[in-house]
Image (spheres, rainbow, N blue to C red):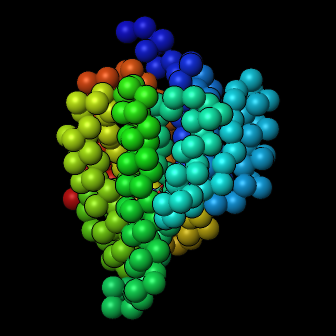
Amino acid sequence: MPLEIFDLSGKAAIVTGASSGLGRHAARCLAAAGAKVAIAARRVEPLMELEKQIEACDGRALPLRLDVTDPASVSDCMKAAETELGPISILVNNAGVAVTQAALEVEEGDWDRVVDTNLKGAWLMAQALAEHMIRLGHGGSIINTASVLGLAGAAQIPAYCASKGGLVNLTRALAVEWARHGIRVNALAPGYIETEINRDFLASAAGEALRKRVPLRRFGTPEDLEGALLLLASEASRYITGSVIVIDGGQSAAL
Ligand code: NAD
């Protein structure tokens, strides 16, 4: 198979939550494959550094302020991206938050923040992008960052599990509904991937115990998501929609 099938030259993408971790890495990866990338997050300052890094490698990055839980912010972000980059055919719904708390102790505000960001935010972005694609008459690829915690349960993190489980099935519902517009919708389900947010925990004794339960005996790195991301973003996945790609070192395959 020719490798050009993964080439994203001439395409434009939006990555939400691009200021850190997996979002920042995804933006760099899509830019390296040739896409112009709108990098969106609540805080714009950390995006400036990312913009410089992408442009230093001859890529194009457009920093945009975005709160995925706010419909007006979503609409402003989409308008700015369309004005600056033209037709957008790739969305990486990466913004997400987690609250670790026993189910009996979860407060309503924390529940709402997690579900509003991880599930409603992804839906608002997908809806805005699909409206844009249908209006401009082109299809594209929506990639939702779910989690293995959207496929199985874990203690002490109920809102996150519920939001990611909802996101997995939202992925399927939108894939079915928007296939006729040439819009593919798929999800990534990462296991434990080392980023700033969990590095200390993964290095702790509790983290070490978790690592031993991963068949490949290590946690993932943001680079480990690149293959699946490029597959779903590019023409290489032109017959894949409504799918969930698990990237967890075998964790969820083990009893
Ligand atoms: P992270 O905290 O570094 O990244 C999350 C990003 O989302 C941040 O940039 C944050 O500012 C942004 N964000 C949060 N709320 C937002 C909002 N309302 N509007 C816009 N942006 C917002 O963590 P990460 O590990 O890079 O996680 C990225 C995604 O991957 C999340 O959806 C997370 O649930 C998912 N995930 C991570 C792991 C892991 O092990 N790191 C595993 C499975 C899934």
In this rendering, the answer to whether 189 lies above or below 60 is below
Q: Considering depth in this image, is 102 or 37 the residue closer to the camera? A: 37
Q: Considering depth in this image, is 108 or 1 the residue closer to the camera? A: 108
- Residue located 32% across and 39% down the image: 185
In this rendering, the answer to whether 141 lies above or below 203 is above
Counting from the top left corner in percent of width and height, residue 44 is at 72, 55
- Residue located 79% across and 38% down the image: 52
Q: Residue furthest bottom?
A: 105
Counting from the top left corner in percent of width and height, residue 78 is at 54, 45
- The answer to whether residue 210 of the structure is visible from this angle is no
In this rendering, the answer to whether 142 lies above or below 42 is above
- How many numbered markers are drawn? 0
- In the image: residue 235, left or right of residue 194: left
- The answer to whether residue 221 of the structure is visible from this angle is yes
The answer to which image quadrant residue 61 occupies is: top right
- In the image: residue 205, left or right of residue 149: right
Q: Considering depth in this image, is 60 or 180 the residue closer to the camera? A: 180
- Residue located 66% across and 54% down the image: 65
Counting from the top left corner in percent of width and height, residue 125 is at 45, 50
- Residue located 72% across and 49% down the image: 47
Quadrant (top left/top right/bottom left/bottom right) for the C terminus:
bottom left
In this rendering, the answer to whether 32 lies above or below 51 is above
The answer to which image quadrant residue 229 occupies is: top left
Quadrant (top left/top right/bottom left/bottom right) for the N terminus:
top left
Q: Considering depth in this image, is 51 or 136 the residue closer to the camera? A: 136
Q: Residue furthest front?
A: 135
